[in-house]
Amino acid sequence: MNHRSTPAVGAALGLTLLLAGCSSDPGTPGPTTTTDRPHGYVEGAREAGEPQLRLLAVSPDGRTTIHDLLTDETSELQDVDAPEHAATDGRFLVTSDDERTTITDGGAWTVDHGDHTHYYAADPRVVGHVGRGGAIAVHSSETTTTLTWPDHGEAVALDREALGQGEVTEVLRVEASVLLPFGDRFVAGADGAVTVLDRGGRAVGEPVACPEPAGGIVTRAGAVIGCSDGAVVVDEDGATTVPLPEGSAGRPTSFAARAGRPTVAGVAGDGGAWLLDAREHSWRYVPSERPFRAVVAVDDPEGHVVAVDDTGRVVVVATADPTSPDGRTATTRPLVTANGPALLQVDAQRAYAADPTAGVVHEIDFGDDARVARTIELGRPVAALAEVGR
């Protein structure tokens, strides 16, 4: 697919992005002594041999539940403000009302260092609050978590290590509708452009045009910000504008993907989904029988895309199926309320779709023709959902 490239955003960008790796891990040991911390040490956390997957759910009145997907045990956390909006980065669940935003630590997370991976577990807890309300987005690197309130055009960056220790420590506040952490920089969308910022919020290089920036995600191949005419992908080499095809379906205004993968998905207007390959700088349209309310790219060898449609069905499309140009589709019966929020989370093997009114979460084996593997009873309605530990 054709695309146009912009000049690199600052010559220093490619050399100064400090991509995560064990050489920069503060827990990496030097010469062995009795006081050295083990490789990958995180204060207050236990390291495990597999992902410590949990579901973190909040009811409409703020009651918070955590369900361990490995042990099938459910426990209660401290109540939070009644959530009107929610987002997650795979560890922290961020909920907000009109007045303020609450950060809850799910106590499980994965650190991917490329050639190997660490899995951690700690006690879940409510961390604290930030004094801004409204629709919310959250994105994290190993060192930084960003919160963005797109309706207000405001964003903050928080110290992620401090968050893990129960403290909300602000390190940067900027005017932006999207703010993504990327290496030792930030990628911001504001005022019709994408700009790379240093740790102090100063621009690095020239901004790149991006009309109406909305929706962002950090992938293994780069940081993505959506635009009215496509997207901008920022990587170590600079920024690339990836326009949507002429006359195509509506633009995506948010993106979702399995953690760390280069291909992301977004709802395409009134029908289907867009897939953006952040490494190849290309779009693919995935048609659908019914409009999608939420969609996530798994980006596995089968090219699975998982969605919830407007009837409440979970739809799975194997886009890499050679027997069909549009992919092979499997659907469930209607599992979630058709007119409520579409609460969908996906990891490498399963998808989790919550029925907000019934207080249940359906675990879907998307690799087995959208089979419902189990149904988890939470015992109360669900207004916000996060799978943590991915």
Image (cartoon, rainbow, N blue to C red):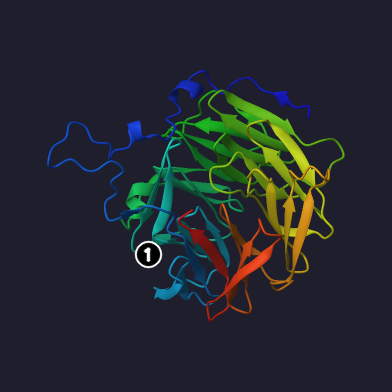
Picture coordinates of residue 254, whole percent (x, y)? 66, 49
Report the number of discs.
1
Q: Residue furthest right?
A: 247
Task: Decide if residue 325 is on the left or right side of residue 143.
Answer: right
Q: Is residue 281 above or below residue 389?
A: above
Asked whether residue 39 is in view, the answer is yes
Asked whether residue 206 is in view, the answer is no
Judged from the image, the secondary structure of the residue bearing numbered disc 1 is loop
Picture coordinates of residue 169, whole percent (x, y)? 35, 50
Residue drawn at (41%, 34%), measured in percent from left and top? 200
Between 331 and 111, the one lying in front of the other is 331
Between 66 and 196, the one lying in front of the other is 66
Q: Is residue 297 above or below residue 12?
A: below
Quadrant the N terminus occupies = top right
Residue drawn at (46%, 35%), measured in percent from left and top? 201
Residue drawn at (54%, 69%), measured in percent from left and top? 83
What residue would you read off at disc 1?
124
User: What is the quadrant of residue 285 in the picture?
Assistant: top right
Amino acid residing under circle 1: Pro
